[in-house]
Image: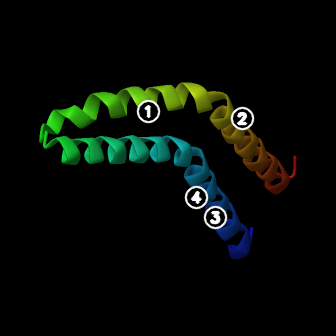
């Protein structure tokens, strides 16, 4: 296995991680921004107000994107196992 192949595998792992986590992080960021704007306009400065809506929205995002996330991770895993079998000569 050459250095270029190892770098390619590492790059694919990082990109898969970013792609899989992006929808959930995006939902959390948007909900946090909306709540921050709401807190600013109403002058409510309660620190715990952001946690419950963020947690609920992130759980909903996980439920909605779960099948896509699992499909993406399974295809990446199959790709890695295919590379391992080529390296092992099997």
**What is the spatial separation of the Cα atoms under label 2 and label 3, in whole angstroms?**
19 Å
| Sequence-first disc among 1 and 4 | 4
Residue 15 lies, with reference to residue 29, above or below; the image says below
Q: Circle 3: is it few (<14), some (14-19), or many (20+) Cα within 10 Å?
A: few
| Sequence-first disc among 2 and 3 | 3
Residue 43 place in picture, x, y as percent? 13, 43
| Sequence-first disc among 3 and 1 | 3
- CB within 8 Å, label 2 to label 3: no
Viewer-nearest of labels 2 and 3? 2
**Which quadrant would residue 10 be assigned to in this image?**
bottom right
Return the mark for residue 58.
1
Q: Which residue is mark 4?
A: 14
Return the mark for residue 11.
3
**What is the spatial separation of the Cα atoms under label 4 and label 3, in whole angstroms?**
5 Å
Residue beneath the point at 66% across and 33% down: 70
Residue 77 lies, with reference to residue 57, above or below; the image says below
| Sequence-first disc among 2 and 1 | 1
Q: Which residue is mark 2?
A: 71
Residue 39 lies, with reference to residue 88, above or below; the image says above
Q: Residue furthest bottom?
A: 3
* SS type, badge 3: helix
Residue 17 place in picture, x, y as percent? 57, 51
**What is the spatial separation of the Cα atoms under label 1 and label 4, in whole angstroms?**
22 Å
* SS type, badge 4: helix
Residue beneath the point at 42% across and 46% down: 30
């Amino acid at each position: 296995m050459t250095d270029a192949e190892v770098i390619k595998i590492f790059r694919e792992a990082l990109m898969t991680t970013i792609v899989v986590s992006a929808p959930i992080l995006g939902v959390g960021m948007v909900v946090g921004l909306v709540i921050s704007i709401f807190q600013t306009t109403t002058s409510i400065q309660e620190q715990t107000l952001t946690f419950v809506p963020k947690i609920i929205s992130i759980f909903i995002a996980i439920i909605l994107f779960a099948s896509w996330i699992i499909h993406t991770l399974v295809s990446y895993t199959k790709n890695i196992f295919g590379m391992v079998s080529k390296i092992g000569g099997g």
